[in-house]
Image: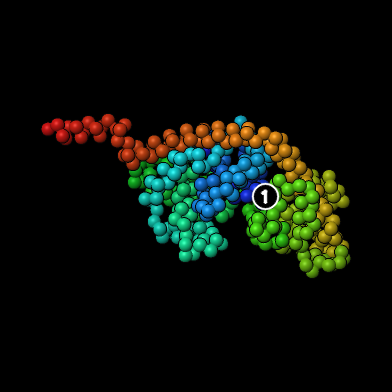
């Protein structure tokens, strides 16, 4: 079976280090291995509009930010297809037909939609477009016959919903669509990196993110003010690792090579943790190490970003070409879907023949 990969992000802000460990670094790894037939990465602007209808400018401005973040992390338009969701109108058409296969109560049970409704205080005024975005996401995935979808944990209900639609469609209209498998980050710490303040979620409004495009000064500032163990006051005090954001970030980012390079008195993270827990290791030293680790990851990304920023029209051209290619693939699937559903009146010679016979008698 061919391997077709599809993932995407909503363009509602720049991408941060949580996106990096949760999905971006994995995508680049998959891309470099080349063990796939097609890989699509989608900027989900239409989905972003489902809860930003009154703020289209925000979505519009963030398309280029997300594209720059992708390219600077190493996603390569020579190897994969990067495209903009709204520029593939076939996706919308597919969603319209899939809507007939999903009940309102099924959407109401979707845990991700449920918690998003709460977060946005939508309880009494949920936009229909927002409520149905899991169906639109099923179109995104099935339009490309994607069978591998690398995502974060919060997206599992979307993949489940997609596969229900696939099974229902295939059983009603005949074998047409392909089921997808979600691929989660391998390491648990990468599933959801906490904010620098220790809050579970990184968010722009909380000001607790480290963005891929942040300057070295901004990164340093964020690391130095990170939440650690509030009871670890003197260097000699024993410190706690659980809930200590500096160690959580080290879990996500630090390798043995980083120790060799920046902190050779420890072999690995376990040794550093042991010392911290015993007492005698100050927060400052650990933070300085984390800063060096983050810089070694972020500096090459920053440098690549600078190069791409010099030619913004070229970045838009990458997106235009990618969208064109995506459109060609999606329209082929749409045609198959319409054939299966028998909404192919003008190309179905059998239909025209049978009806002429019926009326020529
Ligand atoms: N829902 C995803 C997010 O919030 C974005 C997305 C839209 C997506 N369509 C997709 C992800 C299809 C994977 C596959 O980040």
**Image height check: is 186 above or below 313?**
below
**Disc 1 target residue:** 16
**Display colour scheme:** rainbow
Q: How far across and down, in percent of the image, does residue 151 sit?
A: 57, 48
Q: Secondary structure at mark 1?
A: loop
> Could you tell me if residue 200 is visible in this image?
yes
Q: Residues within 10 Å of mark 1 (few under 14, many from 20)?
A: many
- Asked whether 337 or 359 is in front, the reply is 359
Q: Residue at x 48, y 35 (%)?
A: 327
**Image height check: is 198 above or below 342?**
below
- Asked whether 134 or 310 is in front, the reply is 310
| Residue that extends furthest to the left in the rendered view of this protein | 361
Q: Residue at x 85, y 56 (%)?
A: 285
Q: How far across and down, in percent of the image, does residue 172 sit?
A: 34, 46
Some atom of ligand 1 lies within 8 Å of the CB belonging to the residue at label 1:
no
Quadrant location of the C terminus in the rendered image: top left
Q: Residue at x 39, y 36 (%)?
A: 335
């Amino acid at each position: 079976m061919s391997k077709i990969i599809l993932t995407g992000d909503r363009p509602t802000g720049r991408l941060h280090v949580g996106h990096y460990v949760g999905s971006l670094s994995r995508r680049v790894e998959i891309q470099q291995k080349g063990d796939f037939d097609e890989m699509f990465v989608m900027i989900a602007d239409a989905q972003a509009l489902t809860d930003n209808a009154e703020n289209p400018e925000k979505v519009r401005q963030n398309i280029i930010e997300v594209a720059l973040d992708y390219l600077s992390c190493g996603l390569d338009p020579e190897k994969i297809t990067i495209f903009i969701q709204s520029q593939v109108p076939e996706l919308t058409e597919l969603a319209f037909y899939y809507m007939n296969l999903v009940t309102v109560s099924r959407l109401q049970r979707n845990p991700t939609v449920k918690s998003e409704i709460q977060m946005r205080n939508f309880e009494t005024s949920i936009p229909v477009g927002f409520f149905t975005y899991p169906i639109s996401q099923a179109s995104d995935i099935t339009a490309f016959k994607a069978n591998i979808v690398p995502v974060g944990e919060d997206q599992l209900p979307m993949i489940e919903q997609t596969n229900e639609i696939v099974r229902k469609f295939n059983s009603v209209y005949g074998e047409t669509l392909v089921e997808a498998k979600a691929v989660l980050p391998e390491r648990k710490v990468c599933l959801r990196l906490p904010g620098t303040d220790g809050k579970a979620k990184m968010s722009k409004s909380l000001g607790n993110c480290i963005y891929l495009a942040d300057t070295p000064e901004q990164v340093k500032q964020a690391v130095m003010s990170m939440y650690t163990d509030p009871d670890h006051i003197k260097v000699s005090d024993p410190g706690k690792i659980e809930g200590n954001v500096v160690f959580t970030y080290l879990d996500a980012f630090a390798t043995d090579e980083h120790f060799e390079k920046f902190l050779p008195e420890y072999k690995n993270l376990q040794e550093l943790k042991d010392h911290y827990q015993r007492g005698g290791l100050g927060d400052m030293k650990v933070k300085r190490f984390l800063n060096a680790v983050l810089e070694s990851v972020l500096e090459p990304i920053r440098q690549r970003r600078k190069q791409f920023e010099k030619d913004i029209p070229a970045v838009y051209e990458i997106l235009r070409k990618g969208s064109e290619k995506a459109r060609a693939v999606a329209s082929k699937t749409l045609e198959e879907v319409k054939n299966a559903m028998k909404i192919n009146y003008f190309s179905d010679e059998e239909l025209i023949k049978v009806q002429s016979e019926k009326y020529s008698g």
